[in-house]
C-alpha cells in the first residue's frame, strides 16, 4: 500500500546546518502542492548571513572531521550506508511525492532506487580514480595530484529533487569535499530528510548542509561566498548564464552547468515496429509531465512512417489520466505550479497563432481543481521557427515535423541554442552512426530514449545546454582540482 494522506506528513521546513534542523526566520515563502494547488508549507529564506554560517561550518567541518583526509574507502563506506538508508526510508519517499510532481509509485520504483544507486556509484569512485604519473625528463618524476576543492556549492531545480541532489552530493562527497546545497524553493522538503540520513549514515555533521530559499537571495549568496570554491548547478539556461557570470566575478570559481534542452527525436522510415517506437517517443516527452531537461519534444519523422506513427501517438495520448501524486494508482505528473502551467498554455497559444495545428490535447485536464495537470499535446508545425519548436516549454508538448531525406532530417534535428540530447530511431547502423556524428548534442540515444541505470555514462549539454558533465567518472573528477608536481632526483 503506497498511498498516503498528505495532511499527516510533517514537513522539515527549515535549514539543515551542522547536523541540526534550524527553524529559519525572516521572510517566508509559501510552498504549494502541485497535485491540488493547496499550501504544503512554507520555508524561510536564508539570507547572506545564514549562507555564511552554513558555508563556514562546512569549511571547518571538512577539515576538522578528517572527511577530506581519511582513507577514501572510509568515505565510500559512509556513502554506501547513506544509499541503503535512502533506499528504505518511507518518509523520504512521501516527502518527495507530496512536494514535487512525482507520483508515489514512480518515486518508490524509480526516483528512490535511482538516487541510491547514483550514490553507490560514487562510493565506488572514492578509492578507484586518482591522478596521473606524467612522462617527463630523465631523473625527474612528474605527477598530477588530485585534491578536493573544500566547499562545493550545489544548486538544484524542482523537477527531480532527490536524484539531482545525489548527482551533486555523490561525487563531491566521495572526492572529500563538503557541500552546501540549495534545493529549489518549489521543492525544499525532501532534500532536508536526505541530508539527515547522511548524518545517520556516519557523514560528519556540517559536511553536508542544506540552505533554503530562492535564487535571488540564497542562491546568489551561495555563489558569491568566498569559501565556496566551485559551483555545481542544474537549472535553466538563463539562470546558468547568470551563475557563470557571478562565479567569474566572485573568485573566478569553476562551474558545472546542466541546463535546458529542446531535444529532437529523429525517426526514419526503417525505425521498426511502430508501437514500440511510439512508446519510446511517448515516454520521451510525457515523463514527469514533460518537465525533464532531456525531454524529447521535437518529433522529426520521415514521410513514409509519419502518418502511422502520429496516429498511434494520438491514440496513446488519449489514455492519460490525472491523479494526485500521493495516490498509488496515479502515473501522470502535474505541472509544478500555476506559473509553469501558464507558460505551457502561452507557448501552445503562440504556436497556434503562428500556424500550428493541435492534433490532440492542447489544454489542461478538466475537473482537476487547482491541480496543474496538462494534457499530452501534439502540435503539427508548419515552420521550424514556430515558438513551440524553438522554446523549451517544459510541459508534455510534442511538435511534429516531417522530412524526406536524411540531410533534411539532420538539419532539422540540430537546434540553434540547445544541444542536450537526441534520439535516433533506425535499424540502419550506418545511418544511425551518421546521425550520431551529425547532431550537436551531449547525449545521443539510438533506438531508445532516456537515461538508463548506467551511471558510468555522463550527461551534459553542448552550447546553451551547459558546461561539464554530471554522472560518470567525469563528474567525480570535476569535484577535484589537480596539482602539477615535478620532482627532480
Ligand atoms: P531555474 O533556473 O529557475 O532554478 C534552478 C535553481 O537555481 C533553483 O534552485 C533556483 O532557486 C536557483 N536560482 C535561480 N536564480 C539564481 C541565481 N541568480 N543564483 C543562484 N541560484 C539561482 O530552473 P528550474 O525552473 O528550477 O528548473 C527547470 C530548468 O532546469 C529547465 O530549464 C530544465 O531543462 C533544467 N534542468 C536541466 C537538467 C540537466 O541535467 N541539464 C536537469 C534538470 C533540469
Image (cartoon, rainbow, N blue to C red):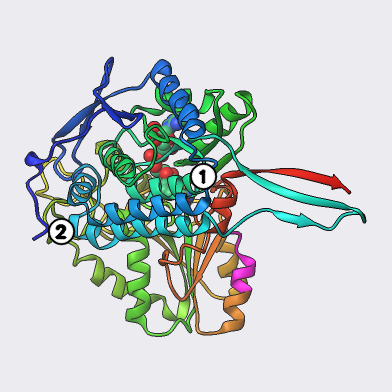
For marks 1 and 2 on the same chain, the one whose residue lies earlier in the sequence? 1
Residue of label 1: 70
* Category of crowding for the residue at label 2, using alpha-carbon neighbours closer than 10 angstroms: few (below 14), some (14–19), many (at least 20): some
Magenta stretch, residue numbers: 434-441
Quadrant containing ligand 1 reads top left
Queried whether the magenta region covers residue 126, the answer comes back as: no
The image shows residue 64, relative to residue 418, as above or below, that is above
Q: Is residue 448 visible?
A: yes
Q: Nearer the viewer, residue 110 or 84?
A: 84
* Category of crowding for the residue at label 1, using alpha-carbon neighbours closer than 10 angstroms: few (below 14), some (14–19), many (at least 20): few
Is 28 on the left or on the right of 281, as rendered? left
Is 143 on the left or on the right of 120, as rendered? right
Is 74 on the left or on the right of 83, as rendered? right
Image spot of residue 249 (x, y percent):
62, 24
Is 140 on the left or on the right of 404, as rendered? right
Q: Is residue 387 visible?
A: no
CB under 8 Å between discs 1 and 2: no
Image spot of residue 157 (x, y percent):
38, 41
Residue of label 2: 330
Amino acid at each position: 500500500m503506497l498511498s498516503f494522506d498528505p495532511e499527516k506528513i510533517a514537513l522539515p521546513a527549515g535549514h539543515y546546518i551542522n547536523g541540526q534542523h534550524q527553524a529559519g526566520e525572516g521572510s517566508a515563502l509559501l510552498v504549494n502542492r502541485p497535485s491540488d494547488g493547496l499550501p504544503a508549507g512554507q520555508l524561510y529564506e536564508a539570507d547572506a548571513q545564514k549562507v555564511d554560517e552554513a558555508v563556514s561550518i562546512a569549511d571547518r567541518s571538512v577539515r576538522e572531521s578528517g572527511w577530506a583526509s581519511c582513507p577514501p574507502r572510509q568515505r565510500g563506506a559512509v556513502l554506501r550506508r547513506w544509499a541503503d538508508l535512502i533506499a528504505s526510508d518511507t518518509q523520504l519517499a512521501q516527502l518527495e511525492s507530496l512536494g514535487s510532481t512525482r507520483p508515489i509509485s514512480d518515486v518508490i520504483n524509480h526516483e528512490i532506487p535511482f538516487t541510491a544507486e547514483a550514490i553507490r556509484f560514487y562510493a565506488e569512485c572514492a578509492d578507484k580514480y586518482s591522478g596521473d604519473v606524467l612522462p617527463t625528463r630523465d631523473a625527474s618524476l612528474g605527477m598530477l595530484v588530485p585534491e578536493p576543492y573544500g566547499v562545493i556549492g550545489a544548486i538544484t531545480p524542482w523537477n527531480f529533487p532527490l536524484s539531482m541532489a545525489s548527482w551533486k552530493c555523490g561525487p563531491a562527497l566521495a572526492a572529500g569535499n563538503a557541500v552546501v546545497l540549495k534545493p529549489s524553493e518549489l521543492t525544499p522538503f525532501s532534500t532536508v530528510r536526505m541530508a539527515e540520513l547522511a548524518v545517520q549514515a556516519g557523514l560528519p555533521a556540517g559536511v553536508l548542509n542544506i540552505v533554503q530559499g530562492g535564487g535571488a537571495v540564497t542562491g546568489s549568496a551561495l555563489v558569491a561566498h568566498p569559501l565556496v570554491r566551485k559551483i555545481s548547478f542544474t537549472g535553466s539556461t538563463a539562470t546558468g548564464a547568470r551563475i557563470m557570470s557571478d562565479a567569474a566575478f566572485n573568485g573566478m570559481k569553476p562551474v558545472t552547468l546542466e541546463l535546458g534542452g529542446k531535444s529532437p527525436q529523429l525517426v526514419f522510415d526503417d525505425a521498426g515496429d511502430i508501437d514500440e517506437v511510439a512508446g519510446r517517443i511517448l515516454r520521451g516527452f510525457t515523463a514527469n509531465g514533460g518537465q525533464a531537461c532531456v525531454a524529447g519534444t521535437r518529433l522529426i519523422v520521415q514521410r513514409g512512417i509519419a502518418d502511422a506513427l502520429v496516429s498511434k501517438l494520438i491514440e496513446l495520448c488519449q489514455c492519460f489520466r490525472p491523479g494526485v501524486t500521493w495516490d498509488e494508482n496515479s502515473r501522470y505528473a502535474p505541472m509544478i505550479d500555476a506559473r509553469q502551467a501558464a507558460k505551457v498554455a502561452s507557448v501552445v497559444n503562440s504556436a497556434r497563432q503562428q500556424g500550428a495545428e493541435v492534433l490532440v490535447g492542447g489544454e489542461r485536464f478538466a475537473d482537476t481543481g487547482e491541480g496543474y495537470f496538462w494534457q499530452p499535446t501534439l502540435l503539427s508545425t508548419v515552420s521550424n521557427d514556430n515558438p513551440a519548436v524553438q522554446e523549451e516549454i517544459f510541459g508534455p508538448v510534442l511538435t511534429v515535423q516531417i522530412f524526406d531525406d536524411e540531410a533534411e532530417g539532420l538539419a532539422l534535428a540540430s537546434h540553434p541554442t540547445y544541444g542536450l540530447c537526441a534520439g535516433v530511431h533506425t535499424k540502419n547502423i550506418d545511418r544511425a552512426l551518421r546521425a550520431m556524428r551529425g547532431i550537436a548534442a551531449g547525449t545521443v540515444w539510438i533506438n531508445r530514449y532516456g537515461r538508463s541505470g548506467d551511471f558510468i555514462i555522463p550527461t551534459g549539454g553542448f552550447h546553451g545546454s551547459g558546461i561539464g558533465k554530471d554522472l560518470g567518472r567525469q563528474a567525480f573528477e570535476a569535484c577535484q582540482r589537480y596539482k602539477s608536481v615535478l620532482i627532480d632526483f
